[in-house]
Amino acid sequence: MLYPHHPPSLLPLIRPLLPQSLALFGTVVLNTWPVSPKPGSSSELFGSAWCTFPTTSIPFPLPRPSPLTATIATTSTSSSLSTLSTQTQTPSLNGTFKPVSPSSLSTSPSTQSPSTSTLTPSSSLSTLPPSTSPTVPTANPDQWVMMIHLPHPTSYQLRLLTSLDNTPLSSLTPDQIESMQNLVQSSLREIKRLDPGLEILGGLNVKWLQGAERVDGVKLRNRCLTFIAPDSWGREYNLNPNHNQAQNGKERDGLRIDGGHQDDCQTIKQYRDSSAPIEYYIDRIPYTTVIRPSTSVTTDAITTTTTNTNNSATPDTTANTTNTPTTLDTDNTNDTTSINSKPIPPVAWIMTHTYGDMGALFTLPSHRRKGLAKWLVVERLQAMRQDGRQPIGWVVVKKGNLASEALWRGMGWQEGWECVWMTLSSDTDK
């Protein structure tokens, strides 16, 4: 049985599972709830969360923090990852999962809860009954599945988390593994019945691939690896002293850091191995960092044919034109290019996707081996940290893309876990 939830109310269960829960964490904290529905979709389901536990007061134990959390956080005494994974933890979670009531929100910023501030629930969502399919087993405190609709209007996607995502398979018994495979299978089958328009299941931990593939119409699309930045990474980044670096760190060797511009979108799309429409790149302008020549110089023509070394493995992400957060990253304000002027075309770029991972990293061939990729990653991560909602740097790359894997390992990022992207169809389940 699946139960509807207000997504921000689930943060106390999501945080302790960081970093494996980053996809759901970013989905919740980087978007405003409730969200506007996709045209033609059910307003009760779009932007909602569905879980195998009810919204009533049930004492669920906190998941154990992931061993990977400690590994990544060891380089800093003040780790963003450690802080985020422990926020709002209490000895008892009774009542945590009730949808947030408007009357429970304080109007004083100093007293607002970080997980509920300025949030109002969907009235239709809070009154939705649970699903009634007898094929979905009821949850128990040790095993649960959580699913959140990624809120954007042009691609209907789902993110899924389980209570065992951060537990190594070697620590699970065969019965525990099979039980969770069955719970993933039955939960996906039920959510497809509730919402047959779903198109993509993204970021599923590879441990539960077998359970997902048991559902008719669910097919493997990409196997991916995650890489995560240690908390101290990039905080004291210094460019090579041999470079001609401006004092503010935003310019060197005739190149400068800049924010994204609408004129950059077609260039970025052209060099990215993705089916995302141009609207997605326009939507991501506030969360895009580029490197441009400081003055007009000859660069690769955007029509140049090159081998795509795109480091992002999330080709299924599309625009969120109805749900752009009001807080913009701080690196997207520049003094030399206004939004109404035509900027010099970029020679390298990166963006933050709708659920918090970085991607679309690319450098034109004529500007490679100059350290521009690391420069971009540092600037983008600094912008994310200044924004504050999701300051953890992480990226998803296609498994087997050896160049991308070597890039992130070479920068000192910690390899995380394997995940999969899957397509969902409206085929009737057997």
Image (cartoon, helix red, strand yellow):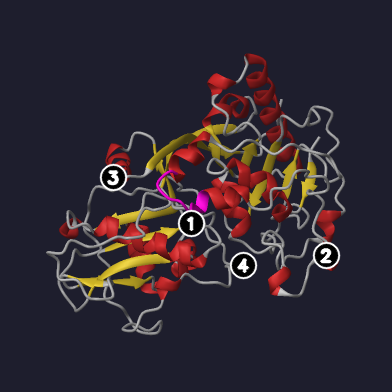
Q: Is residue 152 visible?
A: no
**x%, y% of residue 336?**
31, 84
Q: Nearer the viewer, mark 2 or mark 1?
A: 2
Give amino acid for label 4.
Answer: Thr
**Dot 3, how many residues are within 10 Å of its Cα: few (below 14), some (14-19), or many (20+)?**
some
Mark 2 vs 3, N-terminal side: 2
Q: Secondary structure at mark 4?
A: loop
Query: What label sits on residue 407 in the rendered view?
Result: 3
Give amino acid for label 3.
Answer: Leu
Q: How far is mark 2 from mark 3, CA to CA? A: 47 Å
Q: Quickly name the residue at label 4.
A: 322
Q: Quickly name the residue at label 1.
A: 353
Give amino acid for label 2.
Answer: Ser
Q: Quickly name the residue at label 2.
A: 104
Q: How far is mark 4 from mark 1, CA to CA? A: 15 Å
Q: Secondary structure at mark 2?
A: helix
Mark 2 vs 4, N-terminal side: 2
**x%, y% of residue 430?**
71, 25
Mark 1 vs 3, N-terminal side: 1
Q: Nearer the viewer, mark 2 or mark 4?
A: 2
Residue 308 as seen in the image, left or right of residue 176: left
Residue 327, compared with residue 148, is above or below; it is below
Q: Nearer the viewer, mark 4 or mark 1?
A: 1
Check if mark 2's residue and mark 4's residue have beta carbons within 8 Å: no
Residue extent of the magenta highlight: 74-81
Q: How far is mark 1 from mark 3, CA to CA? A: 19 Å
Q: Residue at x 67, y 50 (%)?
A: 11
Give amino acid for label 1.
Answer: His
**Dot 1, how many residues are within 10 Å of its Cα: few (below 14), some (14-19), or many (20+)?**
many
Magenta-colored stretch includes residue 378: no
Residue 180 as seen in the image, left or right of residue 206: right
Q: Secondary structure at mark 3?
A: helix
